[in-house]
Image (cartoon, rainbow, N blue to C red):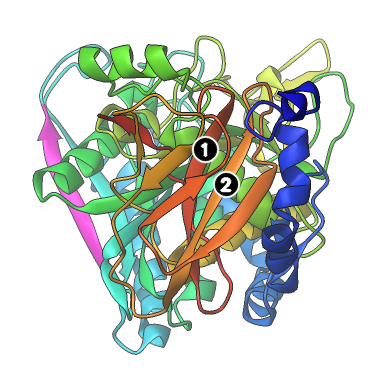
Amino acid sequence: MSQQTGTSRRTVLAAAAAATTAGAVALQTGPATAHDGGGLTAQEPPRELRAILREIDHRRIEATVRRLAAFGTRHTLSSQDDPVRGIGAARDWILAELRRHARASGGRMTVELQSYVQEPGPRIPTPTRITNVVATLRGSTSPDRLYVVSGHYDSRASDVMDFTSDAPGADDDASGVAVVMELARVMATRRVGATLVFAAVAGEEQGLFGAAHMAEQFKQRKADVQAMFTNDIVGSSTADDGTRDPRTIRLFAEGVPSSETPEEAAVRRSVGGENDSPARQLARFVKEVASNDATGMRVRVVHRRDRYLRGGDHIPFLERAYPAARFTEPAEDYAHQHQDVRVVDGKQYGDLPEFCDFPFVARVARVNAAALWSLAQAPGTPRGAKILTAALTNETELVWERGTEADLAGYEVVWRETTDTDWTHATDVGDATRHTVDLSKDNVFFGVRAVGRSGLRSPVAFPAPQR
């Protein structure tokens, strides 16, 4: 047929752009701006979010890092009852500070110690109490939907079992704890739609114990944790060769899910979903809301669960099927982490506050704040997204469940070439739970995201095939 000699919308994605111009224009009339990757537009920070970001104070962050470093060591096996040195003194100070911040919340923020006894094992020679300090800011409209942010307050020296030597742990990970505590301070005075959880966890250096306990507690009570971020080693913008990158933060996001079952693996292989895990969708969302002039940062997404030979507190959440990702500085200096404090041939070793860049840490906190606030104020990620595959056709029909949020305005269907990393096209489908696109599901990847009345959008849900 003559019409087959030209480009077909079902076979060439570029031709679909003209057919969906109306949807693309609709996107740009909402809170969106052009995004440095081209294609789909980013979400412009609303006025309230910009106000929150302006309140983040690098001087407070510096004071927190220096105070935590001053406890000498915060090793998991160090003293739990010494009032001035060790992990117990750090725990009590963090608890007092978070309770002080909570007083400004009008009762919406509560603070608790989450403790358990870890039985002996690798790096834990005797039964040891592990305690997380957790502040929870209850959401006003969707309180059962949770978003978690953490840093670990334990530290270590060169020997992971040395619990007596100084281990100031300024970058690893007083910096991450300072981010969490500053976020709790600023957010305590705000009303957010969903619930935010701010956690300073322990036992990371000995085996991710505190985070694993927290993740398991969420799983046992069937909590709806829709995102988790850990901030671990976010204190410096200077690499070991002296080069600086003060405007970039790495975000590690796994592809193949850590929790994947054999059945889910078979589906993933059949549809090619290696780059569309919940963690990857979360990372794309963070880029959309936090790579902008309001944060002053570029989010560099790294398609790995973590760095070589390393791990972080997001992993226990990933293992329990919660979307999670790790923030880490752009290039590490290994002389200033996991090192005894000492001078060798005139070179200072040790994780000391003097090697931190506190304005950089404040910008990392702004990236976290932009992501958390945008997640909490937008509708939740759509559930039950499916591509109908009962019949062979060059059209694509998608279905999903309608969310229950009072401010839910509708949905968008998004898509991209299979060789693209980020979503490039979107169309507004209104307050519906089914939509057909005149494009072949064999040629492109599809997703669905929710849109609130304010124009804020959720992370994308990647649809599974359904016969």
Residue 145 higher or lower than 316, as above or below: below
Was residue 114 drawn as part of the magenta stretch in this picture?
yes
Residue 393 higher or lower than 33, as above or below: above
Image x and y of residue 75, in percent: 37, 32
Q: Residues within 10 Å of mark 1 (few under 14, many from 20)?
A: many
- The single residue placed furthest to the front in the displayed view is 1
Q: Is residue 127 left or right of residue 318?
A: left
Q: Secondary structure at mark 1?
A: strand
Tell me whether circle 1 and circle 2 mark residues in contact (CB < 8 Å).
Answer: yes
Task: State which tag comes first along the sequence, 1 or 2.
Answer: 2
Question: Magenta region's main secondary structure?
Answer: strand
Residue 40 higher or lower than 166, as above or below: below
Image x and y of residue 403, in percent: 31, 64
Amino acid type, mark 2: Val
User: In this picture, which residue range is highlighted in magenta?
Assistant: 110-118
Res 446 label: 1
Front-most of 414 and 263? 414
Front-most of 116 and 55? 55
Read off the residue under disc 2: 414
Residue 170 higher or lower than 383, as above or below: above
Query: Does residue 363 appear in this view?
Result: yes
- The N terminus: image quadrant: top right
Image x and y of residue 338, in percent: 54, 21
Was residue 21 drawn as part of the magenta stretch in this picture?
no
Distance from Cα at disc 1 to Cα at disc 2: 6 Å
Image x and y of residue 329, in percent: 68, 35
